[in-house]
Image (cartoon, rainbow, N blue to C red):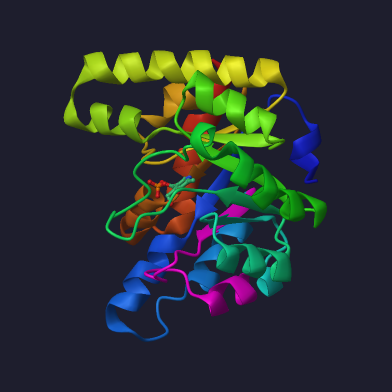
């Protein structure tokens, strides 16, 4: 447990460093190093670091997970698909948290939430050893009642709500859809919280759309990657994070 875990109404910022590895892998060498970015984010006040080891290793590599476990003092949130290979890797490293995400090779990023309701039995068995090993298990799902109830039934203590559709509608200027998505996220964050789940959110968040999500009082953690890493090119990672943190805190205080 981190200090902030025990503090109610604190909104944590988890920084996802996957896309530093995407740039590294574009040339196949060692730079830029995602572990260096993670340590920089940690020094700049990240509450946690998130890294997604995909089946095809398109960004984060196995050696990155090993190095992150050694280098970090803040919690590592290890994103992974529900496969035997990933379960073994997680059990070998026992990171602070694991976030179970759906994964399709052909997708550019994690497009939807996990279909927990359809795979309840398998997922219950899948997460049990991870929880026993001391990892805080989180399930990345759409803001849908059936998925939240299923995540609760399989014994996951945390859910992360997929904010992708909300962010995309915002970016496209489709404000009717954006507002409908926000209403859904608002209602489902409260529903999940009432069930006793810890609620996180993430995917696609930017300076332009983070505030209404950060203002939801049940949400305890935001995981943000692509936008922050892109913004870091122009202003540096600490400064990019500081602006995100400022927006999150202002929304929370309002
Ligand atoms: N949360 C989860 C579960 C994700 O899979 C991702 C993307 O890897 C993120 C948060 C971060 O999304 P983004 O990179 O769009 O900020």
When the figure is inspected, residue 138 is found, relative to residue 148, above or below; the finding is: below
When the figure is inspected, residue 95 is found, relative to residue 92, above or below; the finding is: above
The C terminus is located in which quarter?
top right
Residue at image x 42%, y 31%? 210
Residue at image x 52%, y 22%? 146
Quarter-wise, where is residue 220 in the image? top right
Is residue 45 in sight in this rendering?
A: no
Q: Which residues are magenta?
A: 47-68
- 181 vs 69, left or right, is left
Quarter-wise, where is residue 62 in the image? bottom right
- 71 vs 133, left or right, is left
Residue at image x 41%, y 13%? 183
Q: Residue 92: image x %, image y %?
A: 71, 71
Residue at image x 53%, y 72%? 36
Residue 51 lies in magenta, yes or no? yes
Q: Residue 45: image x %, image y %?
A: 62, 51
Q: Residue 182: image x %, image y %?
A: 39, 18
């Amino acid at each position: 447990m981190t200090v902030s875990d025990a503090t109610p109404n604190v909104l944590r910022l988890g920084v996802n460093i996957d896309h530093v590895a995407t740039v590294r892998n574009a040339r196949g060498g060692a730079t830029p190093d995602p572990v260096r970015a993670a340590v920089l984010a940690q020094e700049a006040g990240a509450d946690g670091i998130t890294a997604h080891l995909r089946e095809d290793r398109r960004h984060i590599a196995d050696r990155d997970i090993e190095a992150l476990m050694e280098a970090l003092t803040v919690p590592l949130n290890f994103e992974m698909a529900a496969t035997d290979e990933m379960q073994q890797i997680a059990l070998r490293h026992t990171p602070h948290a694991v976030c179970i995400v759906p994964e399709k090779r052909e997708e550019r990023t994690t497009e939807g939430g996990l279909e927990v309701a359809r795979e309840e039995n398998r997922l219950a068995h899948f997460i049990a050893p991870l929880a026993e090993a001391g990892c805080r298990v989180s399930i990345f799902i759409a803001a849908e009642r059936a998925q939240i109830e299923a995540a609760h039934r399989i014994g996951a203590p945390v859910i992360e709500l997929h904010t992708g559709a909300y962010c995309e509608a915002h970016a496209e200027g489709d404000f009717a859809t954006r507002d409908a998505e926000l209403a859904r996220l608002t209602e489902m964050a409260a529903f999940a919280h009432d069930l006793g789940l810890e609620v996180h959110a993430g995917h696609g968040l930017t300076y332009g759309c983070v505030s209404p999500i950060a203002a939801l009082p049940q949400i305890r953690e935001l995981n943000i990657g692509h936008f922050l890493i892109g913004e870091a090119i122009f202003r540096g990672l600490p400064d990019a994070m500081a602006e995100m943190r400022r927006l999150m805190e202002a929304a929370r205080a309002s």
